Amino acid sequence: MNATSRSGPVRVAFDSSALKARYCNHGIQVYARNLLSALRDAAPKSGMEIRPFVSLSDESDAVLNEEAGFRPRKTRLLRFDRIWRYGGATAAAFLDGADILFNPNGASLSINMLLPTVTTIHDLTPMVMPYFPRRITVLLKFLLMRSAKSSASLITVSEHSKRDIVRLCGVAPSKIHVIYEGYDRALFNDASPDADSLHALLTRLGISRPYILHHGAIQPRKNLPRLIAAYRQVLARNSRLNFDLVLAGPLAWQFDETVAAARDKSDSRGNVVLAGALSDLTLSMLLRGSALEVVPSLYEGFCLPMVEAMACGVPTIAANNSCLPEISGNALRYFDPHSVDELANCMEEALQSEDLRAELATRGKERAQEFGWERCAEETLAVLAQVAQASRARAKVAGVAL
């Protein structure tokens, strides 16, 4: 869709607050960073101009260099989180002459009388599975509800999340567009990792055996204490299986139970490695060297780690809830994430059967090819153009020249 009109190209202000360092290694930053890069490449062909905000006090990433159809905008307001979240982003975009604001992080407020906003709501964790203190949970629920109702249009990342938004926020289905995320194909693929580099990494992390992997921020909905219990159950009843369990990801919040379970040495055969936050390059190497990826989450909006594992040709098993069967295309083996026994049985079956692992790897790679940041950017631009052009049309009818 070419969005150029007699009023010039559609000017899209991009709320880049999710790119701040504190979101590093979290899904919201991965989404914002990769989508912004893909929008930079796609915008000129669509006749649109992407305007990501840059804080005057921050060093800009290479992705924020100015080029055709991509004009970063400097603002002091980005430094002030509360002001930015509670209307500051809309004000900055309006004063800069934008036609529309795109917010890739759903928990913020927009000023509708100034500018239409398109918001991505990835999931409704604070409503479906709240783990924060009550005050924070109430605030997040309010922000998500207000954002869902006040945005001109919504983007979400799975049909499952769309149903949650309709059910819990009372938003019309026609207002919500499902656009799947992508993944970095240059990093997450089935190329064999360099043997020497992988050996050095495993030595540094203290991994001495073949290993089962889970990657992602360590927080309650990831369900990692049950994964650790299932892992130890598998080792206890099957002496032929000799694997480490590696949990790669930052300690996010309410991680004490997971850390305590990982450090419990009562089972001499089990070795749970907390690898911590890793760079994308290091993570991709660790992932490609693993024997099995396990995704036991209690709730997800999209689950990029699962897609990354599938893209790498790593045999993957996953919980049978939320969006996981949808995003994986029912190509994997699934288990009840609340049942340690069922999780252990699924792990044991996959670890013992080379044929099953080969089937899971092949089917996972095929499904992963359906996801890409380029496609995500093109579909996102189509939504932004539709909303912006509708706003321009309404302004003309009202006799307001934009």
Image (cartoon, rainbow, N blue to C red):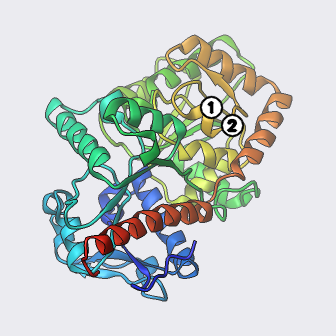
Mark 2 to mark 1: distance in Å? 6 Å
Q: In the rendered image, which quarter contains the N terminus? A: bottom right
State the image coordinates of residue 266 (x, y, percent, origin top left).
47, 17
State the image coordinates of residue 135 (x, y, percent, origin top left).
13, 34
Q: Is residue 65 left or right of residue 347?
A: left
> Disc 2 vs disc 1: Cβ atoms closer than 8 Å?
yes
For disc 1, the neighbor class at 10 Å (few under 14, some 14 to 19, many from 20) is some
Residue 95 drawn above or below residue 218? below
As shown in the figure, which amino acid type bears the numbered disc 1? Answer: Pro
Which label is found at residue 275?
none
Residue 223 drawn above or below residue 197? above
State the image coordinates of residue 183 (x, y, percent, origin top left).
59, 56
Question: Quick one: 312 or 166, which is closer to the camera?
Answer: 166
Residue 53: quadrant of the picture: bottom left
Q: Is residue 305 visible?
A: yes
State the image coordinates of residue 108 (x, y, percent, origin top left).
24, 53
Q: Secondary structure at mark 1?
A: helix
Which label is found at residue 325?
1
Q: Disc 2 designates what residue?
A: 329
As shown in the figure, which amino acid type bears the numbered disc 2? Answer: Gly
The residue under the point 30% across, 38% down is 253
Q: Is residue 209 left or right of residue 68?
A: right
The residue under the point 71% across, 42% down is 314
In the displayed orientation, state which residue is furthest to the right.
355
Q: In the rendered image, which quarter contains the C terminus? A: bottom left
Q: Secondary structure at mark 2?
A: loop
Question: Quick one: 291 or 105, which is closer to the camera?
Answer: 105
Residue 362: quadrant of the picture: top right
